[in-house]
Image: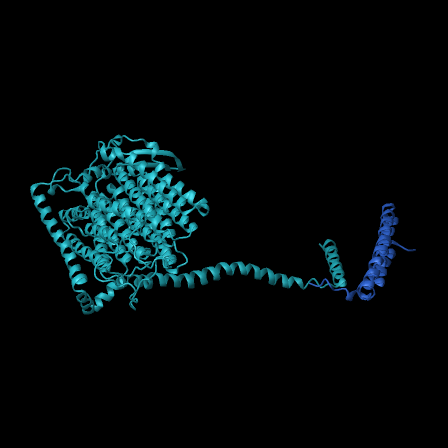
Chain colours: A cyan, B blue
Amino acid sequence: MTGDSSMLLWIPLLPFLGFLVNAALGRRLSRGASGGVACTAILASFAVSATVSWPFLFGAPAGAVDQRLYTWIQVGDFVATFALRVDALTALMILIVTGIGSLIHIYSTAYMHEERESEYARYFSYLNLFAAFMLLLVLGANFLMMFVGWEGVGLCSYLLIGFWYTKPAASNAGKKAFIVNRIGDVGFILGVLLAFRHFGTIDFQEIAAALGPVAPDSQFGVVSLIALLLFVGATGKSAQIPLYVWLPDAMEGPTPVSALIHAATMVTAGVYLIGRNAVLFSHAPDVLVIVALVGTATALMAGTIGLVQHDIKRVLAYSTVSQLGYMFLAMGVGAFGAGIFHLYTHAFFKALLFLGSGAVIHALGGEQDMRRMGGLKHALPVTYWTFLVGALAIAGVPLLSGFFSKDEILFRAFQSGHTWLWTVGVLTSLLTATYMFRVVFLTFHGTSRAGTPAAPDVLVADGAHGPSHAGAGHAHLHDAPPAMALALLVLAVGSVAAGYVGVPHALGGDNRIEAYLAPAFGAGSSEADGVEAGTPETPGEAADEHGATLELGLMGVSVLAALGGIGLAAFFFLTRREAAARAAARFAGLHRILLNKYYVDELYDTAVVTPLVAVSRHALWRGVDAGFIDGSVNGVGTIVRQGAAALRQVQTGSVRAYAAGLLLGAVMILGYYLWR
Amino acid sequence: MATLDHYLLLSAVLFTIGTAGVFLRRNLITILLAIEIMLNAVNLTFIAYGRFLGAVDGQIIVFFVMTVAAAEAAVGLAIVIAMFRHRGSLNPEAFRTLKG
């Protein structure tokens, strides 16, 4: 119960103020000023976050700190307070969001410097807003607060992916991201409504407390349904099957935006949602199995697609989808700590990889096709070495951060008895290493292929780096400018070091992060609630001797997988380039399927989009709108007009006809009185 | 000896003549004259009843009717002259601009 709760509001408020300044005054500010405002805002937010998180990270294991600002909505039983809350999980999340976010802001000042000043300010205002909403999402103490942030990041992703809105591909990608996210949001909303109906509250702590004494669903009950609906929301935000399709298209945005979406914000929201409601999900074992299966399937599927893509950012996008699959696998086997641990390490190396790829694209004047890269190792030394560190980390090479977190997930998957999931996980780990080093070798090694005409089967729009970068002034190769290099170096250090908070017991570590996060996943993270902090799946004690041996064995397997993957990549893409082409020709069918991403977009197009458009056009537009609604409005008009046309005949204009009418009327009235 | 019935019959005949004049004549001035006949037919009824009932009300109303008739004749003739200047015709069928 430490920490100054009154500071919490400043964490999302500072970037929001930065957004307001840039949004209102952006046109009048110079590039330096608007970039400076944005960076200052997010750095200040980082400083506040660090202050707030300090007691959680280095003090005694603390409960939660609340800041209740006011009662937002009160209708009958429904009460939503505008309340922020920090616990161990949120403390970690705000540090990731503001920390990685700050680096991305700094990097962007250099990356976007060729934009016009108003565009530059617009970019930074969106970036600040994105961070603000993400912080609101992780700080919200109840579902409604989280929902505001949840929708906010959806909005900002739309704005940033479609940043170069004059390019149709970019604006379409923005719309796709928004719409696909909305589909998931329906699940989220329904889940929240059902949670309120069932528990009578939307506060996370109160829900967890209410569930504390209840046994987990033995069958598929209400709690399971709530968890499943929330998971649907999570698949939308966190790009899992079946709603992952927006994420690869999101590469149309500026590269730092991709880094922001993939590393610090947005896609981690779904994982965070499950972590935040760990107790709820623990009470729904059936749903957890679904989560694990979906996560694993996504990891494998995205990994295989990533293997053959030509666009450097697209490979990274599929790798994010794949790594998110790992996180969901961890969540699904109840290893919430491991999932969040991977989220945290992934934030470092994925941001690094994206920013590194951005540096490459920047250096090549907007080139994203790896078939026209190569041999950049010497021209871009900083980028090369940092990118290599990131690739080693994501591949799971020992002693780097990705190794610890990914291994923890795989170990926990195996331990929970899901041997099949473990097998697929290891296979995916091999794929990860292969496709990452395919990128490294194709981009940085070999000979330069710059200027090679694009192959006819290019699937992605080239020159996607925005109109300004495609212009002149970029003819020569140049390594990352200082602001970009700084971000890359810091992230590279992070990618190496971040894992050491979670060294497993088997390697003589104490897995600090697991113990640190445990209270956040417990039944009641506040002692004041009087509920025992039972952590269903967290191993409180050191693993026994057998477990340690098992863990070491599994670790060996995954290290072999990682090194094997790197070896495969080296064989196919470094030493024997023609072997890769031969293999592609040999398995032409498979290659084409992978290159076309399993035709999932086409499938959705045929199965969902086309029927939906047809129904909308024929039934809703022509039938309901034009037929019924317009029909009734026009019908009223027609009746009036035709009635008037009939009545108009009475108005002859002849005085004598009127006089006749008068006389007739008088006679009739008189007659009535005389003969009644 | 002329009874009330005779006066009422005469009045009805005059009113019918006036009405027929309004409908059948094709000259606005004649129509105005026909209207005068109708008014005076009504006046006759008032006078006859006044006499028959021994009340003075009928005569009072007749004065009012005569006043209104005078005003009506003045305004009516003025309008007829204006219309004639406008259209060069006194046929009421020439004035059908307000046909719906």
> Residue A15 vs residue A673: left or right?
left
Quarter of the figure with the C terminus of chain A: bottom right
Please state which of residues A602 and A37 is positioned toward the viewer in this rendering. A37
Q: In x, y percent, where is residue B93? A: 77, 66
Looking at the image, which residue is at 24% across and 65% down?
Answer: A593
Please state which of residues B9 and A163 is positioned toward the viewer in this rendering. A163
Residue A266 seen in the figure: no
> Residue A401 vs residue A64: left or right?
left
Q: In x, y percent, where is residue A600? A: 28, 61
Question: Residue A244 appears in which quarter of the rendering?
Answer: bottom left
Please state which of residues A368 and B98 is positioned toward the viewer in this rendering. A368
Q: In x, y percent, where is residue A638? A: 57, 62
Please state which of residues A647 and A305 is positioned toward the viewer in this rendering. A305
> Residue A462 vs residue A518: left or right?
right
Residue A648 seen in the figure: yes
Question: Residue A73 appears in which quarter of the rendering?
Answer: top left
Quarter of the figure with the N terminus of chain A: top left
The furthest residue to the right: B1
Looking at the image, which residue is at 28% across and 66% down?
Answer: A452
